[in-house]
């Protein structure tokens, strides 16, 4: 049996275990599993420590390690919640949000001009797309980067498209994204991936950070509203929404400078959110690879 099939069998094993015990047992299971990975199978632990040290230079070594341990727990909870979401009903998914709503965006969406939802690897970004599609009662077109493992990738596609949302795969997506926006559709983008070495440079946690042109090019070309939305975990399975409509005021006239400015505005909103609960962001990502 090849590696991909073995990984997926383990994935399905965890899927069955987590759904057998249910959401109420997730905190206990997450503490155990995240502890095993943090202390005994420290995948990307050095990267987490390195990134946190850069982002929070005033914190002591002990404080950084405690924050890293919390980060492993939060990421483990997010993974377990994904397994729960794969079988949860519409009402159960809607019930996971206890504070905030998307009313600020609904009016703009219903104008059928096209809309961009922008989020990051924070809290539970997959819940954000499922919840948004259900509550606003539209099909969200979700831009994704496929997982390396094709079996896991198919599982994730089924999760994302359980209801009316649709995946658009990164890399072959530009025409499809333009077409969706031109038709008055709504797209969802997780915009905090590291961009290429010659990408758009912004400031994130006082570090020069490369980003993609991505959403900014689409927004400027189609002149559509952009909503930055984060689902912040209050407790396991319970979230509050933080949503901000991005300002297009006082943008530079030069297109490349306008793209950079919009990317900076997004990353500033992201940083403000991450600083509130830093353990909920995906610090395992090598965001500052080119430094």
Image (spheres, grey):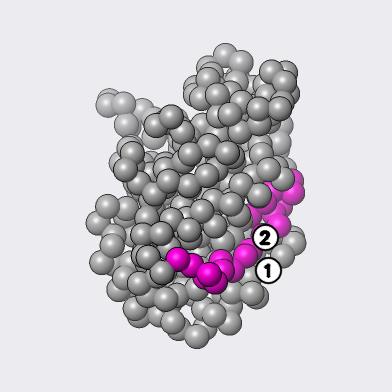
Tag on residue 65?
none
Q: Disc 2 or 1, which lies upstream in sequence?
A: 1
Residue identifier under label 1: 101
Residue identifier under label 2: 241
**Regarding mark 1 in the picture, which secondary structure is present there?**
loop
Q: Residue at x 59, y 39 (%)?
A: 205
Quadrant of image for the C terminus: top left
Q: Residue at x 48, y 58 (%)?
A: 261
**Regarding mark 2 in the picture, which secondary structure is present there?**
strand
Residue sitting at the far front: 253
Q: Could one spot residue 44 in this view of the protein?
A: yes
User: Where's residue 88, x and y in %?
Assistant: 58, 56
In this rendering, the count of numbered labels is 2
Gap between marks 2 and 1 measured at Cα: 6 Å
In this rendering, position of residue 172 left or right of residue 116:
left
Question: Magenta span has 239?
Answer: yes
Quadrant of image for the N terminus: top left
Q: Could one spot residue 82 in this view of the protein?
A: no
What stretch of residues is rendered in magenta? 231-252
Tell me whether circle 2 and circle 1 mark residues in contact (CB < 8 Å): yes
Above or below residue 185? Residue 166 is above
In this rendering, position of residue 99 left or right of residue 247:
right
User: Where's residue 152, x and y in %?
Assistant: 38, 41
């Amino acid at each position: 049996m090849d590696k991909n099939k073995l990984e997926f069998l383990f994935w399905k094993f965890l899927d069955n275990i987590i759904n057998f015990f249910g959401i109420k047992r997730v905190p206990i299971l997450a503490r155990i599993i995240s502890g095993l990975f943090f202390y005994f199978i420290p995948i990307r632990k050095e990267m987490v420590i390195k990134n946190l040290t850069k982002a929070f230079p005033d914190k002591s070594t002990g404080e950084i390690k405690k924050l890293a341990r919390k980060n492993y727990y939060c990421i483990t909870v997010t993974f377990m919640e994904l397994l729960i979401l794969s079988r949860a009903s519409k009402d159960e998914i809607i019930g996971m949000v206890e504070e905030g709503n998307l009313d600020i965006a609904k009016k703009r969406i219903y104008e059928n001009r096209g809309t961009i939802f922008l989020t990051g690897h924070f809290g539970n970004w997959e819940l954000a797309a499922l919840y948004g599609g259900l509550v606003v009662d539209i099909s969200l077109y979700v831009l994704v980067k496929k997982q390396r493992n094709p079996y896991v990738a198919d599982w994730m596609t089924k999760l994302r498209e359980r209801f009316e949302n649709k995946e658009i795969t990164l890399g072959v997506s530009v025409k499809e994204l333009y077409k969706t926006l031109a038709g008055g559709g709504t797209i969802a983008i997780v915009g905090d991936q590291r961009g290429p070495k010659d990408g758009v440079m912004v400031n994130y946690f006082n570090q020069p950070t490369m980003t993609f042109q991505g959403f900014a090019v689409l927004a400027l070309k189609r002149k559509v509203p952009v909503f930055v939305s984060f689902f912040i975990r209050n407790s396991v399975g319970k979230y509050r929404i933080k949503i901000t409509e991005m300002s297009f005021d006082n943008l530079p006239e030069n297109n490349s400078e306008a793209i950079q400015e919009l990317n900076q505005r997004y990353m500033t909103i992201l940083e403000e959110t991450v600083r509130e609960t830093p353990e909920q962001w995906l610090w395992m990502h090598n965001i500052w690879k080119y430094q």
